[in-house]
Amino acid sequence: MNLLTPITLGAVSLENRVLMAPLTRMRADNEGVPSPMAIEYYAQRASAGLIISEATQISELGKGYPATPGIYSEPQVEAWRKITDAVHAQGGKIFLQLWHVGRISHSSLHPNDGLPVAPSAIKPAGKVYTASWALAEYETPRSLSLDEIKQLRSEYVHAAKQAQLAGFDGVELHAANGYLLDQFLQDGTNQRTDQYGGSIENRCKLVLEILQDIIPIWGSGRVGIRLSPYGSFNDIADSDPQKLFSYLINALNTFNLSYLHLIEPRATTAGGSDQLLADAPRTGQLFRPLFAGKVVLAGGFDQAGAEKAIADGEADAIAFGRLFISNPDLPRRFELNAELNPYNRATFYGGNEKGYTDYPTL
């Protein structure tokens, strides 16, 4: 079984290739401090080769949903430290996913900062959860100034340093799923005319600058990045995804990263419907040959599909989401070919321990 063999991702040695995908669960408090329940939740899943934490905002303005955690304040760091200690006590490894949602937000979630921000003032289609968990129309975001982009870079640096203080084993830069860094990459959301807009090189500039900023903190072997070529979640689109992501992935080769994490565009929404996109290109097939390092794939894999992706050379490891929610001991179940617990979609977001820490292990 390929999935259960050890692997080294950069500076991090893993016992298996069954990774826990970053999973937004919306159970933090109003100040973005992870709940005490999260200690048990992550510790239960420490048999993953690597846990990638739920997306964690780098600043108050980076928040896009109620009850998501941050990494910018001291109480947040203290709460995360208890989580990383619990994971390490079980022999696990855990990276923090650094997140800024950009325009996928609402001013009620960051009342001190006003409107959400984006590369360009383009309103997303759809609806957003406000601070009171009510659904509202998206607001038209404010375009970031060059000075604010400098400030944004310093916030990523601060968050990366905070993740070290919180005891993580590394960080993953979230540049996928239509959030802020993806908004800079794709021309459907980036219509700037300065050095961060226009050409593919200019649109990739911010992502590459942030990597240059945080690698000296962690070392390149403890930094990964997540991308979602051909994804449409959060009203994201580009006129030539293959050209854009081919350029970016080639540029990533200079950094010697821990891994490149790619989302297969198989499901119609992130965390939503299970319906597969029949005409979606295979991200692993298209972009794996361009990247010199290790590739992690995510996107609705079952055990057989994951084994095949590794055997076919499309990936070195697979990140599982929903299956890890409902099966805390997923690697063991794969090893024994045991039956899997079904997941309960109604308890994915918000709530208490139900559907969070109460799924049975073998």
Image: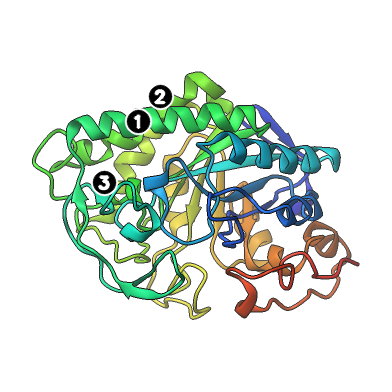
Name which of mark 1 and mark 3 comes first in the sequence: 1
User: Is 134 drawn above or below residue 315 in the view shown?
Assistant: below
Closer to the camera: disc 2 or disc 1?
A: 1
The residue labelled by disc 2 is 213
The residue labelled by disc 1 is 153
Name which of mark 2 and mark 1 comes first in the sequence: 1
Neighbor class of circle 2 (other Cα within 10 Å; few <14, some 14-19, many 20+) is some
Helix, strand or loop at label 3? It is helix
Query: In the image, is 223 to the left or to the right of 131?
Result: right
Neighbor class of circle 3 (other Cα within 10 Å; few <14, some 14-19, many 20+) is many
Q: 129 or 146: nearer the eye? A: 129
Q: CA distance from mark 1 to mark 3?
A: 13 Å
Amino acid type, callout 1: Arg
Name which of mark 2 and mark 3 comes first in the sequence: 3
Please say if the residues under marks 2 and 3 sit with CB atoms less than 8 Å apart.
no
**Does residue 252 appear in this view?**
yes
Give residue 101's position: percent from left, percent from top: 38, 52
Name the residue at the front extreme. 112
**For the point 78% across and 49% down, which residue is it?**
46
Q: CA distance from mark 2 to mark 3?
A: 17 Å
